[in-house]
Image (cartoon, grey):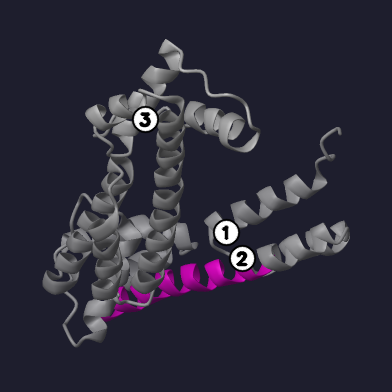
Amino acid sequence: MTEETDWEELRTLAQDVLESGAPLELTSETRSLLVRTARQVAISQQDAEDALCSLSTATTLLREIRQRIRDGSHRLGDSLARAGTLQKKGDLDGALQAIRDLLAVEVVPLYREHAEVQLEELTRLMEVRATGRLNPDLSDRPQLAVLAQRIQQGHALEFTDDLRALLRRTAPTAAVSEAETEDALKTSEGAEALMGMILSRFQKGERRFLRSMYRMTSLRDAGDLDGARQQMRDVLAVEVVPLYREMAEEQLRGLDRPPPAS
């Protein structure tokens, strides 16, 4: 695990010095902050201490630390989003490559750690898809998705106790009743159909909610709160997945709250 970061304090200092024009004062606290945060973005202690010999080089160090934090954050966000999109499309190879491409250029330990966690998860999902054997350390729904991909690739569904348990756990999250679930689990064909139903409900629910969120935000920003509320009401009129119902209800509550005092 990487050490805790001091980035909020660093960002405040950078804002004051680099944007507001405040003088950089090399107090013992500031020196310590710059040395620590330099290490946190993969600048050696020696290089950081050398930079602290003058205000000019210390300011350059401050700018470089902030830039590495910003650039790495953008790279990580973009790469995770791309990997997630490819994973949803069933392209695990492409998702893995997106993370490998990030690791090929990223130097900040915290961002590398996040990327490596995602790389390990994707690698394990590849193993689930290749073998059909579930991994207890992985989340349920991604494993369900790769098992469905495995079936699409022509492999027979391995109707194991682990799979039955997985379907019993995930069915309620897609608003499938216990009776429906147990009836489906009587045969491998029923289990396969249940798997498809669970995944389909989540996919449709996510698309529906995101489209409605976009319209709601546009209407809210235009001052049409009634229209914004109607977007979430329309979701609730048809949505069955508890997660997306809760999200829509939370958005409605947010629209009903009074605006913050100016």
Asked whether disc 3 touches disc 1, contact meaning CB atoms under 8 Å apart, the reply is no
**What residue sits 35% from the left and 23% below the top?**
53
Q: Which mark is residue 244?
A: 1
Identify residue type, mark 2.
Phe
Residue identified by numbered label 3: 37
Q: Residue furthest left?
A: 131
Q: Which residues are magenta?
A: 189-212
Q: Residue at x 14, y 66 (%)?
A: 127
Q: Residue furthest top?
A: 28
The one of 125 and 3 positioned closer to us in this rendering: 3
Coordinates of residue 114 in the picture (x, y in percent): 31, 48
Secondary element under disc 2, as helix, strand or loop, is helix
**Residue that badge 2 annotates:** 209
Asked if the magenta segment contains residue 203, the reply would be yes
Position of residue 126 measured from the top left corner of the image (x, y, whole percent):
19, 68
Q: Is any part of residue 235 visible from this angle?
A: no
C-alpha span from label 2 to label 3: 39 Å
Taking the image as shown, residue 139 lies to the left or right of residue 6, namely left
Q: State which mark lies toward you, 2 or 3.
A: 3
The three-letter amino acid code for the residue at tag 3 is Thr
In this view, the residue in front, 252 or 103, is 103
Q: Name which residue lies at 58% across and 24% down.
A: 23
Q: Secondary structure at mark 3?
A: helix
Is the Cβ of the residue at disc 2 closer than 8 Å to that at disc 1?
yes
